[in-house]
């Protein structure tokens, strides 16, 4: 097979060589531009705010954000608050933040405690308004994918009183992210973890 660039004595071959090199240069620049654009896009899980805190919130701002919502700092990684609930019960909220040099794990937990009346929730009970935006954003970030991946991630169809992924157990989304989502009218558990390049 003849190499058109090897016969440099004729102008036509020079034009051919120039065309090949120009195409190669443009192609390589396009690939580099695509790689830069793709690399600069943030993973949707970095935008999820749990009680106003995301995977990218500076650590020094977290205490003020949570204390402004009525949370009390128990230790460097745990914040809690309690609100009265019907039948002499209390709703307890817990936010846990575990930071390391390469990762952050955010946890949000709501549960009912105390009281003697353990009657079941009413039929029209729903996930609280204060949580529904966070819950739906997290569900959408993980489950707005193709049917095969939805099935693999066990994305249960969301209901007004229940939103769940992976049967409420921790799910590895990719090499850098893991999530847990189990929300209902009576309790909620949410965990988002980002590590390495994903944080």
Image (spheres, helix red, strand yellow):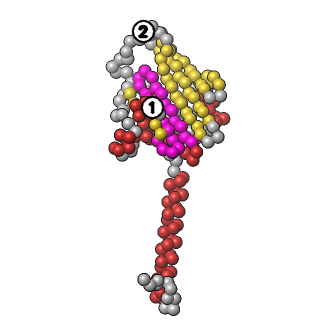
The residue identified by callout 2 is: 117
Real-space Cα separation, disc 2 to disc 1, in angstroms: 29 Å
155 to 184, vertically: above or below: below
SS for tag 1? loop
Which percent across, then down, holds residue 34?
A: 49, 60
Q: Is residue 69 magenta?
A: no
Bin the neighbour count of mark 2 within 10 Å (Cα to Cα): few under 14, some 14-19, many 20 and up: few
**Residue occupying image coordinates x 65% and y 25%:** 75
Residue at the outermost top position: 116
Tell me the element at label 2.
Answer: loop
What residue appears at the point 50 percent right and 54 percent down from the top-left corner? 38
2 or 1: mark nearer the eye: 1
Left or right position of 52 against 12: right
Q: Main secondary structure of the magenta part?
A: strand
Task: Check residue 181 for magenta coloring.
Answer: yes
Q: Residue at x 38, y 27 (%)?
A: 162
Q: Which residue is mark 1?
A: 169
Picture layout, residue 7 above or below residue 96: below
Q: Quadrant of the N terminus?
A: bottom left
Question: Magenta residues, as a range?
Answer: 173-195
In x, y percent, where is residue 142? 43, 40
């Amino acid at each position: 097979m003849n190499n058109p660039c090897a016969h440099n004595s004729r102008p036509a071959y020079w034009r051919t060589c120039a065309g090949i090199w120009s195409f190669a240069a443009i192609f390589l620049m396009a690939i580099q531009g695509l790689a830069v654009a793709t690399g600069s896009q943030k993973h949707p899980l970095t935008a999820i705010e749990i009680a106003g805190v995301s995977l990218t919130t500076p650590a020094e701002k977290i205490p003020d954000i949570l204390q402004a919502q009525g949370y009390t700092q128990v230790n460097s990684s745990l914040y809690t608050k309690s609100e009265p609930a019907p039948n002499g019960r209390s709703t307890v909220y817990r936010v846990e933040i575990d930071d390391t040099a390469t990762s952050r794990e955010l946890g949000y937990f709501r549960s009912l405690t105390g009281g003697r009346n353990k009657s079941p929730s009413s039929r029209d009970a729903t996930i609280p308004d204060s949580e529904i935006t966070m819950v739906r954003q997290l569900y959408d970030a993980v489950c707005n994918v193709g049917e095969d991946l939805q099935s693999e991630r066990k994305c249960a169809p969301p209901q007004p009183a229940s939103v769940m992924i992976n049967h409420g157990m921790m799910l590895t989304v990719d090499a850098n992210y893991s999530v847990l989502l189990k929300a209902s009218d009576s309790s909620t558990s949410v965990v988002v973890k980002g590590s390495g390049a994903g944080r």
